[in-house]
Image: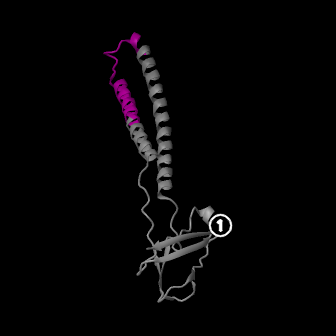
Amino acid sequence: MEGRGPATIHDVTLSKTKPPPPPTTSPRLSSLLTSLTETTKSLARAQKSLDALSTYLSTLDAQSTESAQLQSILDAYESTAASLDDKVTRLEKEKQRLDREVKEEKAALAGPKGNVKLGLEATIAVFAEFEGEVEITIIYGSSTLFQIASGIKCTIHLFLSFDQRNLVCAVRYPRLDGHERETCYSYL
């Protein structure tokens, strides 16, 4: 930090800022969870149907079943069981896919893990006894390539407090394209 002009830098405080809490849900996550619940229930029903079919076949006995009906009963069992097996296999794959997508969506909502070196806030108290131009230079390091790769943006929030009226403050800062930008603040 550097200062030039008829002012005194009273205090510079660095503090950590807490990042906002990540969102816990999204429309996509809600949709995935609904689909997962429906698929899980369908899978349970299909497995119960298979169990019921096996139980039914085991309850047949030779005395109550005619031998002429035996082939049609076994054919019906085989086709129904094959159909239910296919349904169970399809639903298990669908459930695995949905589980994976739910985990991916939750990870995406959580965002990148924080870096303890980021999220710092600087508070600078400057006092000037009389009117004049004051220049304060804040120097911080941040690679544009790093910002792009990590999805992190460096931002500056400027809060000005004036004790007197009729004061004007111009803030100039360089942009990434090499040009300078100026913003004026006044307290009239």
- Total tally of numbered discs in the picture: 1
Q: Magenta: predominant secondary structure element?
A: helix
Regarding mark 1 in the picture, which secondary structure is present there?
Answer: loop
Is 130 rendered above or below residue 113? below
47 with respect to 179 (left or right): left
Quarter-of-image position of residue 132: bottom right
The stretch in magenta equals 42-70
**Is residue 158 visible to the viewer in this orientation of the structure?**
no
Residue 111 position within the rendered picture, expressed as x and y whole percent measured from the top left: 50, 59
104 with respect to 139 (left or right): left
Residue at 46 percent across and 22 percent down: it is 78
Is 113 rendered above or below residue 160? above
Is 27 rendered above or below residue 135? above
Q: Where, quadrant-wise, is the C terminus in this rendering?
A: bottom left
Q: Which of 163 and 138 is in front in this view?
A: 163
For mark 1, does the 10 Å Cα neighbourhood hold few (<14), some (14 to 19), or many (20 or more) residues? few
Residue 172 position within the rendered picture, expressed as x and y whole percent measured from the top left: 59, 73
Q: Name the residue under label 1.
A: 176
**Is residue 154 visible to the viewer in this orientation of the structure?**
yes
Confirm whether the magenta stretch covers residue 64.
Answer: yes
Residue at 40 percent across and 10 percent down: it is 68
Which amino acid type corresponds to the residue marked 1 in the rendered image?
Leu
Q: Nearer the viewer, residue 139 or 111?
A: 139
